[in-house]
Amino acid sequence: MSEALAEASEAAERGEVPIGAVLVLDGKIIARAGNRTITHCDPTAHAEILALRDAALRLGNYRLLGATLYVTIEPCAMCAGAMLQARIARLVYGADEAKGGAVHSCFEVLSHDRTNHRVEITGGVRANESVALLQRFFTIRRARATAQDQP
């Protein structure tokens, strides 16, 4: 999770929402990414999606069997769906996402009884650090927006 938090910090430095993801297979980091939706002008460029894409390319297989994905925040429905398609074995995430989390908070995509794959889920890992990154990012963003509104 330390590496995912580092990716999230780098995303914040680029002006992206600070979310990081790292994919591990057989004890080795295969792929890592931070959000790049603004940088790539792409609404699908979430950290999880970028890490899954990179891992699939590196391994030469869109199925990432046995892989664990570490993410700083509970994934959205799009990212959770991609994890099912990739057939990852495990998801480890930091903080819950009350407004759009699709693993536990709003939906339960990875454990729904009608899906054809199940993912082992561990949440709450270093959640305070993940939340602190987000809070700091949005505090700075709001302060900048307020300063720009001043005559």
Image (cartoon, grey):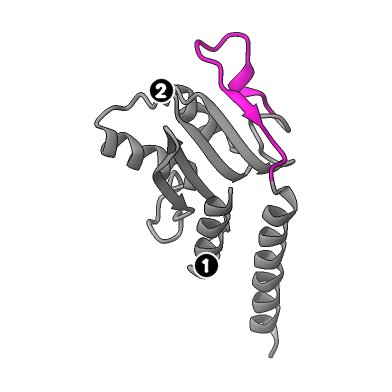
Rendering coords of residue 135 (x, y %): 72, 62
Nearer the observer, 146 or 106: 106
Can the viewer see residue 74 in this picture?
no
Q: Main secondary structure of the magenta part?
A: loop
Amino acid type, mark 1 = Gly
Foreground: 141 or 91? 91
Q: Residue at x 67, y 81 (%)?
A: 149
Mark 1 sits on what residue? 15
Relative height, residue 64 to residue 112 (above, below) = below
Q: Quadrant of the C terminus?
A: bottom right
Q: Is residue 97 magenta?
A: no
On screen, residue 112 above or below 69: above
Magenta stretch: give its range: 107-125
User: x, y (%) of residue 150?
Assistant: 70, 86
Q: Quadrant of residue 98?
A: top right
Other residues around mark 2 within 10 Å, as few (<14) / some (14–19) / many (≥20): few
Write down the residue under mark 2: 65
Label at residue 86: none
Q: Amino acid at mark 2?
A: Leu
Q: Could you say where residue 12 lies in the image, as x and y percent from the top left?
A: 55, 65
Q: Which is closer to the viewer, label 1 or label 2?
A: 2
In magenta segment, residue 119 = yes
